[in-house]
Amino acid sequence: MLAADVTDAMATELPTHYLDAISLGKIVLIREQLLRAQATGMRVFRFESGDPSFSVAPPVLDAIAAAGRAGKTHYIPNNGIPQLRDALAAKVRDRNGLAGVGSDDIFVTNGAMHALFVTFGALLVPGDEVIVPDPMWTEVVENIRMAGGVPVGVELSAADDFEYRTDRIEAAITPRTRAIFLNTPHNPTGAILSRERLLEIVSLARANGLWIISDEAYEDVLYEPWTHTSIGALAGDYADRVISIFSFSKSHAMSGLRVGYIVTTSHAMHSRIPKLLRCTINGVNSLAQWGALAAVQGPNEHLRAMCTEYAERREIMLFALSGLPGIRAFAPHGAFFVWAELDASAYARLGVPDAAALAEKLAEAGIGSAPGDAFGETCANAMRFAFSCDTAMVRDGSVLLRAALSEGIA
Ligand SMILES: Cc1ncc(COP(=O)(O)O)c(C=O)c1O
């Protein structure tokens, strides 16, 4: 029985529930299909997955082992171990320019995913609207909905390099708007918001009394000459209305260790967030936090090395997607995804009705991808190809992907 069928079956046995409206995730379904194929011995190419292929740095593993041996395996404060919160406060002050942040402003979460859940849960009341880019990694809108909020998409377009346009954000503001959500570098397009655009968003939020939620999970995955700016560093006396979210998953390839964090100086959030932390996870796995401490305090040459390798994979994949009639791929400025738009001529050529059908056909051939409609309302004619799997897989899979998209899939 497929996961989707399980939900349908449950829905018939139980009264309607808010979770019935939340998807199980189109990308998850593609991943399951690929893993089933892999289990039968087929070689698969994990271009649907945003999981960094790299190993966790040895000092992080050593710190985890040492903490375990030292018996640091008991309950810990639910907002995180003090040593990690101190180090993260210093990191966001020094590297992100979040002036005045102290360790009490840091809340360690079970990855950025949980940070989103906690942030929207602590901020929203039912019916509150949150403006989000469209396309956007789906879990953001799902978390808004789970908190009773209403996501309001703002279309990003290729003509603007997928930058979040402030005139469009402004047009989406209503009396029910509570917050503007942004994500830079952006999943799925790889766009990076410029300093000027971030300043405009701060002005807009300030003029309308809105909160800003900034997801910076990909802050370290950048391609030259692009750099990352944290909106919290530009907010001045409006900074306590900015909630910033970070993660060790992408920066440090620690996805399975599940460490992320929220930074907020708001008193209201300080009182609400600990309640959600206590009643959901009651603190992130203590050993993972000791590992995160080693990661944030340790050398960061390997972060640069990872970016160099991502840059190589990016070129391979961009080449694979270049010059294909009806398919237009965009070079990401950050993160590890190539976003490609498709038109009717590509569908006709490949014998598929749409991008969702193409993603399914590719998956049958062992090639992962994520169809545009997994990311929003305005992007059905697009696909996302991730290059976070290892370089050999990117290289070999890109050859097959190019063949499939030029000659068709058998
Ligand atoms: C934009 C964005 N935010 C947050 C996350 C969550 O990452 P994690 O929960 O692993 O920290 C992801 C994961 O893919 C993401 O793409």
Image (cartoon, rainbow, N blue to C red):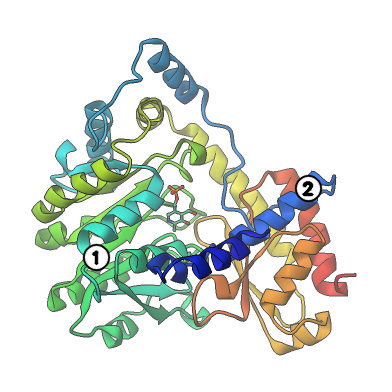
The label on residue 311 is: none
Seen as rendered, the residue at the extreme top is: 70
Q: Amino acid at mark 2?
A: Gln
Q: Nearer the viewer, residue 231 or 255?
A: 255
Task: Please state which of residues 274 and 366 is positioned toward the viewer in this rendering.
Answer: 274
Circle nearer the viewer, 1 or 2: 2
Q: Quadrant of residue 319?
A: bottom right
Q: Residues within 10 Å of mark 2 (few under 14, many from 20)?
A: some
Seen at 12% across and 63% down, the residue is 238
At 51% from the left and 61% from the top, the residue drawn is: 333
The image shows residue 330, relative to residue 276, as above or below, that is below
Check the image and report above or below for 116 versus 124. above
Q: Is residue 402 left or right of residue 197?
A: right
Residue situated in front as seen by the camera: 387 or 141: 141
The quadrant of the rendering that contains the C terminus is bottom right
Residue 14 in the image: state x and y as whole percent.
Answer: 45, 66
Disc 1 from disc 2: Cα separation: 42 Å
Residue 268: horizontal and vertical position, in percent? 11, 55
> In the rendering, which numbered label is found on residue 212?
1
Q: Residue 328: x, y in percent?
A: 66, 77
In this rendering, would 160 be left or right of 177?
right
Badge 1 element: strand
Within the image, what quadrant is residue 71 found in?
Answer: top left
Q: Which residue is mark 2?
A: 38
Query: Which residue is situated farthest in the right direction here?
Result: 410
